[in-house]
Image: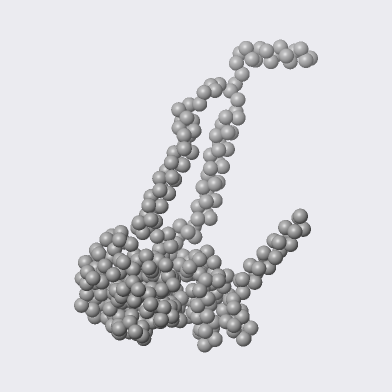
Amino acid sequence: MWRCILLLSLLLLAATAKAAVSDPADMLRDQAQEERARVLGRELRCMVCQNQSIEDSDADLARDLRRIVREQVATGRTDREIMSYLHDRYGDFVLLRPPIRLTTLVLWAMPVIALGLGATLIMVARRRSGAAAIPPPLSAAERARLAELEQDAQ
Amino acid sequence: MSVSPGPRRRILLFAPLGIAAAAGAGFLVMLRGLSSGAYNPKGVPSALLGKPVPEFDLAALAGADRPGLTAAMLRDLDQPLLVNFFASWCVPCLIEHPQLMRLATDGVPIMGIAYKDKPTEALGFLRKHGTPYQRIGVDLPGRVGIEWGLYGVPETYLIDRHGLIRWRYAGPLTEDVVKADVAPLLRRYA
């Protein structure tokens, strides 16, 4: 049973790994160029599926964009030229790592904001429980009882 | 020590309920917006807004009795117009088609670009449902679509009289979208 599940999950993993590779017919012959195209492609969002890079997506548009990236790599355009070609047409959204701007500041600052919020929450909670942990001073009756007990112990 | 919760604690007890109610209300608004077309979660603003139409030159659709479309034809216009990317294989295109037909009979110039569609099939689609377009360009490889920053069909662009792209809508035009966006924009850029 467990073996079966393991085998199945391994098979599934292999399938996704295979799907991530673009059509071999589209690949560039030059290994170094193909690698460059892949690195660029992983930085570009598939506009249709939105949460995948164009290298990972099977969408038609992603495939077209992969071809465009490879064509431009083959004609010797620089990485920056290729990225700006796509950025000019598809805007910030096509970049999986959006530029830091006023509009994207909240997005980039989110880890710090979340961490700060969490830390403040913890601090507030601690201070409260700390305040509650200090017991009120003993009353006269309690002190008398304590003295009594201490004497008994001796 | 008192055991009964104070009034502040009691408010906190109802906080999760309040949050859930607010989230539910928000979700309802979102759903209603989705069904009317007013809210589009995939609606990414076009990078071409305020920019001139990209350079392109598309051949006419054979048999459609309409001339082809080039970027030069979208400059220096008498009135604003719509450019609509469509395909016969696209179901939302069929859904929005009546809106395009209505706009066309109201005198709004609409240019069509058949995106990744076999000319015979695009022609069949238009013969069956009517042709709202004044000109039709055929973009079989979909390269002109990429020049426009297109990411699916249907997509509709509003071009002002100077040939600048003023508005882009990804998805089927509904009656609400025409009323809320297209009509006011056509008036504004007239």
Q: Which part of the image, by quadrant, shows the N terminus of chain A? A: bottom right
Which quadrant holds residue B42?
bottom left
**Which x, y percent locates residue A10?**
71, 63
Q: Is residue A139 left or right of residue B10?
A: right
**Which x, y percent locates residue B49?**
34, 71
* Residue appearing at x 50%, y 55% in the figure: A110
Q: Is residue A57 left or right of residue A17?
A: left
Q: Is residue A47 left or right of residue A32?
A: left
Count of marks, rendered view? 0
Towards the viewer: B84 or B101: B101
Above or below: residue B92 compared with residue A110: below
* Residue appearing at x 62%, y 86% in the figure: A29
**Extreme residue toward the right, this view:** A154
* Residue appearing at x 36%, y 59% in the figure: B37
Towards the viewer: B116 or B65: B65
Q: Answer whether residue A99 is visible to the viewer in this image.
A: no
**Extreme residue toward the front, this view:** B128
**Which x, y percent locates residue A134?**
60, 28
**Which x, y percent locates residue B87?**
40, 74
Q: Answer whether residue B156 is visible to the viewer in this image.
A: yes
Which quadrant holds residue B124?
bottom left
Q: Which part of the image, by quadrant, shows the C terminus of chain A? A: top right
Q: Is residue A146 left or right of residue A22?
A: right
